C-alpha cells in the first residue's frame, strides 16, 4: 500500500494545489471561445458559477 506523506508541509502543498485547480476550473467554466456565439447552456452555467460562494477566504494557509 502506498504511504501518503501527512506532514504539515505536504498537506499544505496539497491544499494549495487543490485551490489552484478549483480556480482554474471556475475560470475555464466561464471562458468563452473568441468570435463564437454563446450557447444557452453556457450562459446558464456561467450564471450558476458566478453565484457560487468563494471558499478561499476560509483557507488560512494560502498566501495570496
Image: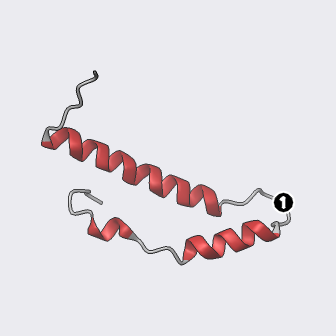
> Which residue in the rendered view is the most extreme toward the left?
7
Q: Is residue 24 above or below residue 10?
A: below
> Which residue in the rendered view is the most extreme toward the top?
1
Quadrant that contains the C terminus: bottom left
Quadrant that contains the N terminus: top left
Location of residue 19 in the rendering, given as x and y in whole percent from the top left corner: 38, 54
Q: Which secondary structure lies at badge 1?
A: loop
Q: Quadrant of residue 14?
A: top left
> Residue at 41% across / 71% down in the picture?
54
Q: Is residue 25 above or below residue 3?
A: below
Q: Is residue 46 above or below residue 62?
A: below
Q: Nearer the viewer, residue 5 or 38?
A: 5
> Residue at 17% across / 38% down in the picture?
6
Residue of label 1: 35
Compared across the picture, whether 27 is left or right of 16 comes to right
> Residue at 21% across / 38% down in the picture?
10
Q: Quadrant of residue 5?
A: top left
> Residue at 54% across / 54% down in the picture?
25
Compared across the picture, whether 2 is left or right of 37 comes to left
Location of residue 40 in the rendering, given as x and y in whole percent from the top left corner: 81, 71
Compared across the picture, whether 41 is left or right of 13 comes to right
Compared across the picture, whether 31 is left or right of 33 comes to left
Q: Quadrant of residue 2?
A: top left
Q: Is residue 44 above or below residue 11?
A: below
Amino acid at each position: 500500500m502506498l504511504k501518503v506523506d501527512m506532514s504539515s508541509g505536504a498537506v499544505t502543498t496539497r491544499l494549495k494545489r487543490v485551490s489552484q485547480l478549483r480556480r482554474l476550473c471556475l475560470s475555464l467554466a466561464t471562458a468563452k471561445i473568441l468570435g463564437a456565439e454563446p450557447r444557452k447552456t453556457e450562459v446558464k452555467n456561467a450564471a450558476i458559477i458566478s453565484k457560487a460562494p468563494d471558499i478561499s477566504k476560509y483557507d488560512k494557509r494560502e498566501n495570496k
